[in-house]
Amino acid sequence: MKQCYWIWYPGDFELYYAMKQNFSRVERGYGWPAFWKSEGFRNRVVFRRTYVLEEETTFCVISRATGFCMVAEKNQEKNQEKNQDKNKDKKYPFGKTVTCGPGEISISIHAGCIETFPSIYIKGDMICSDSGWMAEDYASAPVSAGYCKYFTQSSQNPALWDYSEKTYQPIRVTDMGNGVLYEFETELTAVLQVTFHDGQCRPLTVFCGESREEALDPEHCYYSWQTDPETGKTPCSALRFAFIPDCTPDELEVCAIHQYVDIPVRAKFHCDDKLLNRIWSVAEHTFRLCSGIFFIDGVKRDKWIWSGDAYQSFFVNQYLMADPDINRRTLLALRGNDPMVTHINTILDYSLFWILGVKAHYDAYADTAFIRQVYPKMCSLMEFCEKQLDENGFLTGRKGDWVFIDWADFDREGPLCAEQMLYLACWEAMAQSAQILGEEAGCFEKRYETLKQNVQDFYWNEQQGAFIDSFVSGRQHVTRHANIFAVIFDIADERQKTAIVDHVLKNPQIPAITTPYFKFYEMDALARMGYLGEVLQQMKDYWGGMLERGAVTFWEEYDPQIPKEEQYDMYGDKFGKSLCHAWSASPIYLLAKYFVGLAVTGPVHGEYELNLYRDAFQYLDCTLPVGKRNVHISWDGNKIAVDDRK
Amino acid sequence: MKQCYWIWYPGDFELYYAMKQNFSRVERGYGWPAFWKSEGFRNRVVFRRTYVLEEETTFCVISRATGFCMVAEKNQEKNQEKNQDKNKDKKYPFGKTVTCGPGEISISIHAGCIETFPSIYIKGDMICSDSGWMAEDYASAPVSAGYCKYFTQSSQNPALWDYSEKTYQPIRVTDMGNGVLYEFETELTAVLQVTFHDGQCRPLTVFCGESREEALDPEHCYYSWQTDPETGKTPCSALRFAFIPDCTPDELEVCAIHQYVDIPVRAKFHCDDKLLNRIWSVAEHTFRLCSGIFFIDGVKRDKWIWSGDAYQSFFVNQYLMADPDINRRTLLALRGNDPMVTHINTILDYSLFWILGVKAHYDAYADTAFIRQVYPKMCSLMEFCEKQLDENGFLTGRKGDWVFIDWADFDREGPLCAEQMLYLACWEAMAQSAQILGEEAGCFEKRYETLKQNVQDFYWNEQQGAFIDSFVSGRQHVTRHANIFAVIFDIADERQKTAIVDHVLKNPQIPAITTPYFKFYEMDALARMGYLGEVLQQMKDYWGGMLERGAVTFWEEYDPQIPKEEQYDMYGDKFGKSLCHAWSASPIYLLAKYFVGLAVTGPVHGEYELNLYRDAFQYLDCTLPVGKRNVHISWDGNKIAVDDRK
């Protein structure tokens, strides 16, 4: 029997769970659904497939949708009378075993559902459900059905995700006098389970915290729950500490049931530097917590799928889990349906990062099928952007668009240089994708060349040795951002790159990057330019600094200047800072790519180049994924040994 | 306290219930969701409103969606300190009482929901929910919130319709030997309730039928249900007869709980002709059964919202219930969201009937607000059609479009004349709508004139005195359809109209109209041309013929030539014919408009013209709605008396 999958209209699954994800944020008692256009799934679809059967066979369609299965048989061999009857389309209810064949059998399965996306499961020896079925939505051309490797059993419901669970006992229980504080070994996304020793079940209130301080502050902590009177459980939320007022430790027991998507970690990192080992390990835990059905920004807040955040996660994923599925789910969730009418997450640059994310996904996994699936949406996104070009062909924000790039003091008059850098990189990605599919790439290359020339003409300032933010005001204002992109995306020529390093990256007069989000790109640019010593030191200072302050996961933001009492404050909110944030897991990418020095060159056959940065380690024992292969690298200070047979 | 309503993004309510309606068809055990694009509701919306309050007030937001209420106060009068705090946006969970004011208060209510459309209810003396709130969907400009007069209580759930119910006892119980047949006084849309005399509740199977024959044919009847073991109830379906096998009349009792939307009938018709009275009465019952949340085609089958069928219902509604709400719900459900990517119900002409339906709605109720609401969708529908014009500007079907008009033997080579007639009428409707809104109408008028000239040039055949089906084949084939439209929509000039009557409408060589659907238009054309005697006779023959065959509701189709044993057969299905079909209720429209002779000329002030066709009646006592007024007309064979004070 072949492997069966639940199937649906491709993308519907992701759009459904993206809504669940983006509507799951809770803050002090109220829900906070993401403030952008929610993309709905289809409600009425049809699945079709034609089989040529050597012999009679049976199958059965299982679905929670309303609908039917229609079978049309063409069989020349059976007797005339039977033939006439068989040639007629015949309809069957779901759940009924259908006998058909031999001969040519055309099957169409009609399904409608309002509350969730219609999905079907076909059980049979010859006829069963997989991506070989075509799906239609009565609006566009047939496409291959969508499926997910986690939904292969007829008893499953594709609208309910089966999370993996692991139970944690508290590592410390403290009687605070007015209640009990429970501490777990690390941050978790967990349901708390309260059991009374007397066997009774009374509802009580639990205050959760990413920090001890947060859990002990009933007014300002984000998550406080009433336990369910039947089960003693709370809803699932981010927590490391839990405070239960008005009780004593001997009255009750508390455990945390951690819920997660089990994506295996394929990388291992161990070197002589204990700090680097800890940074890797904490980054790994941070990243895994933020890698569920989708890449999300943080587990306490926002719990949303952000395109710019996800883009960085693709690079960490490549070196840690090398799981292409979560990339695909995230990219499909972000892009939504055609036509495109608003920018992804409302942010102009986040639309562009989606295109770059598709490229990053391809570069890591050579996933041509996915490029083929999303190529029409890549094109429609770029067409959407082209509606907002100015007279020089520069991309500008429309009214209501968020032109973000970073929280920084840009000269925002007129089109922003950093946006043009991303836009340029998108044309390059489009050309690459077109080539992969054998489509016409010349038009994209031409766009790239024209825009590049204009960027050079309008934004490069020879005196300052830098790209300026914007040319409209005449202020010639320089920040790091556009210059970092010019290095990363290879838009600056070699002479310009050197100037950028001297006059921008290493120039203390140019305001420093303040967010870990953009620190990722700054470190990447410095590393590409060969300043690995600087990168290593910054990594140890910045991520090491968080560890010194007791971090067990890496934070949304960290400023060593801020006094310890205010370290959880952000957005003017006492515990506003997310203490487990995906974009702070970048050391995995930096250590693997630039220090272990492994670059994936051929994902299909597991080809790579290795260029160990020997100065960083006296000793290294490390495994990194390359395609389906795991590459084991060891270094004893003298010799590199590589084992890539796994 | 002001009248509060549940509010939502306008159209979402209708799209949600339209899916419920279009997915409700059941046929011999399987669900048959409508085979066209289902238009989904929005999942994430925000409602906004600014109040200037004289004094402090409170309000509370009630919603099943996830979200919050944000309040921003600007108050110059309060002391500085309080002011600073108050000026900050403050978020509140749903269900919490908010105190605010005096001063300027800006409120935004954020709501997300996956399974159904997000809706909110705001309870307060000053601040409460009605159409004065603006709704946004993060994709387009703010619009006035949608509401429904049936949802005014905070305890209601806008996703659950409260149907009115009336219990019917069977009028006849027959022991068939192998079971019991229950007959009700007429056709109903009902839940059957089975009660065992011994007080026990056993599950059993009930076979339903619109006819006695259908209920007694367990193999071919459409609806057969297992009663719920707890309640003894079946799901709701169309039925007049119910057969329960393997039981005797003294074992159990059966009643039918009819479920309906209570739209009051405002018209009354009584005349000296008993047959006409019965035709009116049966048409009224037929029409009410097909008028629920929406106008549907039939109650047993398809139970779908069809644009062409609904268009005819608008005319009957005007003279029977004069309820603009069901028109609005039906029109919003049919048109769906922008952009338009497929034709309504997949049928080219049904898209055009939507435009004409908006015009019919305006002509009946002068509902300018609705024109304003749907005008952008009228424009986008016409723009969608313009993408499929041929070199002469004629509207053609794209691949996959259903170019229907009627089940008739048209010359279908090239663009069909009847489609151009409808398209012409649409340009006229567009010009009218633009004028109502003070928009530029000239462009539509120009389109009308150009297309009309082309239609005259390409389709009018002077020799035959008729418009031909199509000009491409050179066959010069004439059917009634385009010619009927040319009369109804005033496209033919007076000379042509006379020729059409002589050479087409009264010409037995031209194949007769075979469907009651198009009979509506043929009767209308004949009546407009003054042939009321013919119309009266045809009405008595056709609808009277159904009554003679025992109809208690009017049928989808009736052919007097068909033997009685086959009279329920249609689509090659023994009981395929719907015995309660909206489009067969047209005698109400014909009798009211042409025989009572009442034409609504000013819906706002209840203005009308009366032109009684005296030859039809010796006696008449009739009430017809005109705007908010009910006009009572009596005729004793000598004198007409009119009372329009009601």
Image (spheres, coloured by chain):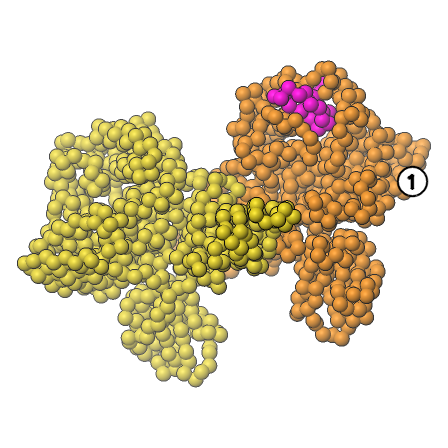
Chain colours: A yellow, B orange
Q: Residue at x 23, y 28 (%)?
A: A453
For mark 1, does the 10 Å Cα neighbourhood hold few (<14), some (14 to 19), or many (20 or more) residues?
some
What amino acid is found at the position of numbered circle 1 in the picture? Asp
Q: Report which residue position mark 1 lands on.
A: B272
* Magenta-drawn stretch, dominant element (helix, strand or loop): loop
Drawn side of residue B326 relative to residue B59, left or right: right
Residue at horizontal 84 percent and vertical 30 percent from the top? B534
A18 to the left or right of B597:
left
In the rendered image, residue B473 lying in the magenta stretch gets the answer yes
Position of residue A562 measured from the top left corner of the image (x, y, whole percent): 21, 57
**Residue shown at 22% from the left, 40% from the top:** A489
Chain designation of label 1: B
Q: Nearer the viewer, residue A418 or A295?
A: A295
**Closer-to-camera residue (B423/B465):** B465
SS type, badge 1: loop
Magenta stretch in the rendered image: B467-494
* In the displayed structure image, the side of residue A239 where residue A103 appears, left or right: right
Residue A490 in the image: state x and y as whole percent: 20, 38
Closest to the observer: A86 or B635?
A86
Residue A263 in view of the camera: yes
Quarter of the figure with the C terminus of chain A: bottom left
Q: Position of residue A16 (x, y in %)?
A: 45, 53
- A2 left or right of A62? left
Q: Residue furthest bottom?
A: A198
* Residue B582 spot, x, y in % from top left: 73, 43
The N terminus of chain A appears in which quarter of the rendering? bottom left
Position of residue B352 relative to residue A135, above or below, is above
- Look at the image and tell me whether residue B486 can be seen: no
